[in-house]
Amino acid sequence: MTATTFTPAHIRDFIRHHYRHFNAASLVDAAQGWVDFDKAGGKMFLTMAGAMSTAELGVSLAEMIRQGKIHAITCTGANLEEDVYNLVAHNHYKRVPHYRSLSGEDEVKLYNEGFNRVTDTCIPEEEALRVIEGHMHDLWVSAEKEGRRHFPHEYFYKLLLSGKLRDNYQIDPKHSWMLAAAERNLPIIVPGWEDSTNGNMFVGAVMSGVLKGYSAMKSGLEYMEFLANWYTEEQAKHPIGFFQIGGGIAGDFPICVVPMLVQDLERDVRKWQYFCQISDSTTSYGSYSGAVPNEKITWGKLELHGPKFIIESDATIVAPLVFMYVLAG
């Protein structure tokens, strides 16, 4: 019996046939809206919260980057680093499908074994975090000595493109979205990078004397300036869409670039021309992450007219399906 290969077109056709109502229909509408937006010359900006890299979203996201379907990304510091951890230490990860029934003693055992748990997946401290920390220390120290400053994602790009990790790959490199992004020099914005393992390591390097100070690392405010200039230039050439996975700072930070440009800099720029969010937040709790898209009109982020979608579901299920649909075109 031969194995069946499912192409993006097969998955798209399955979705079209079976996903007819409710959140399933919202998925179809949003994915088709992205396809139409892409065919009309639009460029897509992706934001990524949660632990999507540890969920191995790179299996589908990397191909979206390679195929030119995503043109810039905002993500948390955790998503930035955890894709690289998975790239070099996947064989040492431990999955605990029974995570809901773990006792406190079970958690202590995992900790003592050198694991950091993210839901059902345990990241190995020594094989992942500490290996990358050593490489980062070298890059940070070198930059400081030479008086250079870089953004967090640029240090990861330097490491990935140097080839120093190549012999340590433990997954198919085509499944690493960070490697795909580095090869295309994709713009990445990482607000609040300080809230990440590598952010903690950088502070530790300063406090322990490995680094003399913080001069080698560009800040989140500088990321906003970088994004403002990128958006100003790109929106003049084509409409820009906003596809948001989850909520929090990964989505809130970049979407504000439009009102900042209009209100604070008085630039005549277009608002985001497509919007979709995969979310399970509840609006009635006062959650901005769960707010319906029209609320963003009052903040000067979205136009009255233009495609707007919310898919209230699990992003680990929904995002790969949307990506396959878009790849099918």
Image (spheres, rainbow, N blue to C red):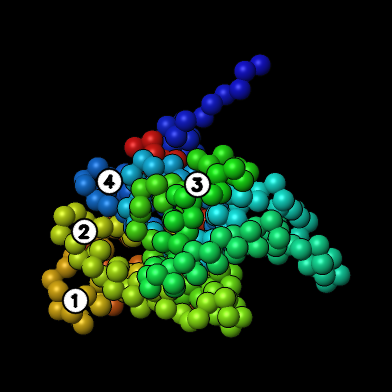
Nearer the N terminus, badge 4 or badge 3? Answer: 4
In the image, what residue occupies the spot 43% across and 68% down? 143
Q: Name the residue carrying label 1.
A: 262
Nearer the N terminus, badge 3 or badge 2? Answer: 3
Q: Quick one: SS at disc 3?
A: loop
The span from disc 1 to disc 3 (Cα, nearest Å) is 42 Å
Tell me the kind of residue under disc 2.
Answer: Glu
The span from disc 2 to disc 4 (Cα, nearest Å) is 15 Å
- Check the image and report above or below for 233 versus 194: above
Tell me the kind of residue under disc 1.
Answer: Val
Nearer the N terminus, badge 2 or badge 4? Answer: 4
Q: Name the residue carrying label 2.
A: 234
In the image, what residue occupies the spot 44% across and 73% down? 144
Q: Residues within 10 Å of mark 1 (few under 14, many from 20)?
A: some
Which one is in front, 12 or 21? 12
Q: Are marks 1 and 2 in contact (CB under 8 Å)?
A: no
Q: Name the residue carrying label 3.
A: 163
- Check the image and report above or below for 50 versus 41: below
The span from disc 4 to disc 3 (Cα, nearest Å) is 33 Å
x, y percentage for residue 218? 39, 74
**Corner quadrant of residue 125:** bottom right
Tell me the kind of residue under disc 3.
Answer: Gly
**Corner quadrant of residue 237:** bottom left
Tell me the kind of residue under disc 4.
Answer: Asp
x, y percentage for residue 1? 66, 16
Q: Residues within 10 Å of mark 4 (few under 14, many from 20)?
A: many
x, y percentage for residue 44? 32, 54
